[in-house]
Amino acid sequence: MIIDKAEVIVTSPDRNFVTLRITTDDGLVGIGDATLNGRELAVVAYLQEHVAPLLLGADASRIEDMWQFLYRGAYWRRGPVTMAAIAAVDMALWDIKGKAAGMPVYQLLGGASRDGLMAYGHASGKELPEIFDSIRAHQEKGFRSIRVQTGVPGLKAIYGIASQGADVGDGSVRYDHEPARRGARPTQEDWDTRAYLRHIPTVFEAVRNEFGPELPLLHDGHHRMTPLQAAKLAKSLEPYDLFWLEDCTPAENQEALKLVRQASTTPLAIGEIFNTYWDYKDIIANQLIDYVRSAVTHTGGISHMKKLMDYAAMFQIKSGFHGPTDVSPVGMAAAMHLGLAIHNFGIQEYMQHGERTNQVFRQTFTWNDGYLHPGDEPGLGVTLDVDEAGKYPYEQAYLPFNRLADGTVHDW
Ligand code: KDG
Ligand code: MG
């Protein structure tokens, strides 16, 4: 199992994806996701210029050793670009190991701890009727847990609302295009935290009244609050019994999250922009979060995330792996295999890729009655159709950003 080819494939069926494809001398092929939304080519360069040459001639079976070599051997540690590149190598090697063993990756991680993975979808709308329709549409698609994002009176454009998304060509407007719109410059949105804090509890009250107490509801604060504002929001949402409040602060100042904890029992989920388990060290040990939000793609791959989740388990903290459409089907498959195997699985984000993406990445996962399963094909269960991928060249795309009324750039 000597690596004799390492190729980086960039494709943009519905949005940009970066995939590492490793081939061994005995003909095994493994793929890994290296997509870093809005900064895709930085990882392409890191992989092509600095990692791929090191892979050639290496033993594909030594996954842990390769991880340590790429991490420790580089001298420069951590960061989203490095960790996405290492994640792609790690995923591709697990894919190869599964194929060599004739087993799905979750079996190699200890086997299934459950029958399926409960997943949540993204409902949104500018106003209540639209939000209610969006929740119902997600329920009809099988979702049993729903994230709710809302417009705020007075604000023209807010991240995460589907109706602001781009037409994807089939006549429908999809949220999955909004996070990184194609174009030469990022689009600008507006923001007012006080207006948001006033409005959000009214939305969750209405949603609870309409849909009852059972439906697990989630909300993403997208890092926009100070600790005090986050405490206020978590407290005001307490009556509506959220499954979680996500990214209530940027979480760079982790100590400050104690303020949120002291004010409220609303569960907190953080970590989609973290990239190593060291980022989580204190936040977990101090019991400041309830769910780990990392993507396998952005946090060093399956090997590193398994260690992170084992550490989190000591503190009864569960997974809530990142699964927006900018995590490719390969990254999603890696999350599903890991989520199925670990005991402390919590929930899986699942935004659903578009048809073009599903043609490029052929998948074996199943979606039944609100539960995902990665399938039982050897490896990760995803095949990259290179000819299909070639039809969709890279297109520059940026995440939006926001400014306050006086023109100040605000937290993402
Ligand atoms: O790349 C950024 C998006 O993936 C992110 O904004 C989506 O916040 C997000 C989420 O929770 O899925
Ligand atoms: Mg988020």
Image (cartoon, grey):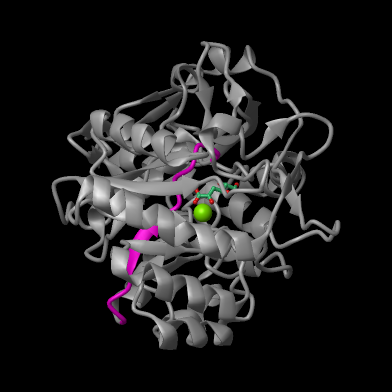
Residue at 54% across, 13% down: 388
Image spot of residue 361 (x, y percent) = 46, 24
Image spot of residue 403 (x, y percent) = 78, 54
Nearer to the camera, 324 or 140 = 140
Residue 323 on the magenta span: yes
300 relative to 333 in the view: left or right? right
Residue at the farthest left position: 115
Nearer to the camera, 238 or 50 = 238
Residue at 54% across, 39% down: 161
Q: Is residue 211 above or below residue 7?
A: below
Residue 96 at least partly seen: no
Nearer to the camera, 321 or 43 = 321
Image: magenta residue range: 315-326
Residue at 26% across, 40% down: 104
Q: Quadrant of the N terminus?
A: top left
Image spot of residue 58 (x, y percent) = 56, 48
92 relative to 244 in the view: left or right? right
Residue 181 on the magenta span: no
Image spot of residue 239 (x, y percent) = 30, 69
Q: Quadrant of residue 21?
A: top right
Q: Quadrant of the C terminus?
A: bottom right
Nearer to the camera, 286 or 311 = 286
Residue 254 at least partly seen: yes
